[in-house]
Image (cartoon, rainbow, N blue to C red):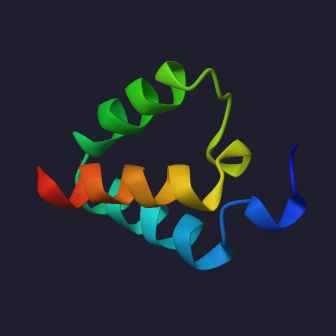
């Protein structure tokens, strides 16, 4: 069951957006990740999904 408390946090969203601004190549990672989860935007991610995305962005 979907719980509103599971939504991406403002801090996570801000961090992803900062990483997108810093490096253009991060956009493809984000787009591919969202597509793989069948999500239309970052705001649709859960906290856990956002955490996984941040891990991907920071590891590259």
Q: On screen, 6 above or below 43?
A: below
Determine the image quadrant of residue 51: bottom left
Q: On screen, 52 above or below 10?
A: above
Q: Residue furthest bottom?
A: 11
Task: Name the residue: 26% across, 53% down.
Answer: 57
Q: Report the front residue among 6 and 44.
A: 6
Residue 12, given in percent of the width and then of the height, sits at 53, 70
Determine the image quadrant of residue 20: bottom left
Q: On screen, 19 above or below 26?
A: below
Quarter of the rendering occupied by the N terminus: top right
Position of residue 26 in the picture relative to residue 34 (left or right): left
Task: Name the residue: 66% across, 53% down.
Answer: 46
Determine the image quadrant of residue 29: top left
Q: On screen, 14 above or below 42?
A: below
Numbered disc total: 0
Q: Residue furthest front?
A: 1
Residue 7, given in percent of the width and then of the height, sits at 74, 59
Task: Name the residue: 72% across, 43% down.
Answer: 44
Q: Report the front residue among 5 and 54.
A: 5
Q: Report the front residue among 27 and 47.
A: 47
Task: Name the residue: 39% across, 52% down.
Answer: 52
Position of residue 23 in the picture relative to residue 3 (left or right): left
Residue 3, given in percent of the width and then of the height, sits at 87, 56
Residue 2, given in percent of the width and then of the height, sits at 86, 46
């Amino acid at each position: 069951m979907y719980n509103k408390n599971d939504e991406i946090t403002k801090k996570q969203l801000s961090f992803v957006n900062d990483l997108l601004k810093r490096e253009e190549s991060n956009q493809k990672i984000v787009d591919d990740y969202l597509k793989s989860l069948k999500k239309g935007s970052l705001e649709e991610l859960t906290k856990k999904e956002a955490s996984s995305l941040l891990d991907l962005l920071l590891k590259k």
